[in-house]
Image (cartoon, rainbow, N blue to C red):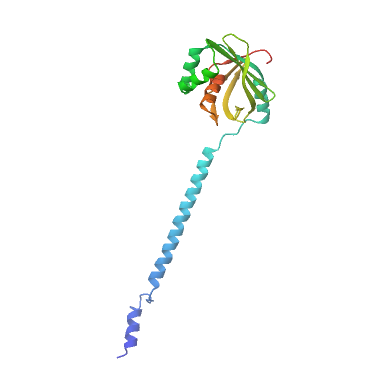
Amino acid sequence: MDVERIERALREGPMDEPIYVPGTYRRAKSGWSLAVGAAVLTGVLLVGIATGLGLGLLRTPAPGLGAAELVALAAKLQGTWTSAEITRQQFINSEVALGNNVDDVDNLLNHDPFASSIRFELSFADGRLSVSASKDGGPMLEQSGGPYRLLDTGEIYYEDLGCFITVRFAVNAEHLSFQRISTRSCGADERAANSGFFNLLPYSRSGGG
């Protein structure tokens, strides 16, 4: 009996079937799995890239104001603006309504007091903002001041001795108003003070505009 010929025939199988080679099926399956895995990974990466680009476009801010628009806006802002009077109690109530702690407002009034009423004056000139106040009908005296500039978003960026204020404003004919301020590196006292300067009352243009 030719044992080797019988074993070879068993390995080869029927005439119409492919010849069996040990390990061939395992290697073929592994290669197919790698191909499928690579295709899936490529698809995931493409979806991730497309999604990231889409979200990036959604987050991209709208183009800011151009140089000519900023110059025109700065020209409208230049000059001196004066508010109406506000009583002490109205001042306190408005400060608290803006989110300032009543204890911080009381502390502000302890070292910068007025008895019955106050009004403010803002003067924009040569890249500097000067903030003055008239207390109880007295003369306008400077309270604060520092450099400012206009951002291409149309907002004022103002530095008050290391306290940084960003605020959007609107000039309508001879009237000036502000949206709520945003602050950075400001203490509670500074936030309350600048809330008072910008957010309690609208302003009207006065002399020097």
Name, please, the residue furthest toward the top.
137
- Residue 126 spot, x, y in % from top left: 70, 24
Task: Pick the residue in front: 164 or 103.
Answer: 103
Q: Examine the image and state in which quarter residue 7 appears.
A: bottom left
Q: Quadrant of the C terminus?
A: top right
Q: Is residue 177 visible?
A: yes
Q: Examine the image and state in which quarter residue 128 appears.
A: top right
Image position of 1 with respect to 117: above or below: below
| Residue 30 falls left or right of residue 180 | left
Task: Pick the residue in front: 19 or 135.
Answer: 135
Image position of 191 with respect to 15: above or below: above
Residue at horizontal 46 percent and vertical 53 percent from the top:
43
Name, please, the residue furthest toward the bottom.
1
- Residue 36 spot, x, y in % from top left: 43, 60
Task: Pick the residue in front: 29 or 119.
Answer: 119
Image position of 32 with respect to 72: above or below: below
| Residue 6 falls left or right of residue 103 | left
Q: Is residue 178 visible?
A: no
Residue at horizontal 46 percent and vertical 21 percent from the top:
103
| Residue 146 falls left or right of residue 35 | right
Task: Pick the residue in front: 15 or 201.
Answer: 201
- Residue 50 spot, x, y in % from top left: 50, 46
Residue at horizontal 65 percent and vertical 31 percent from the top:
66
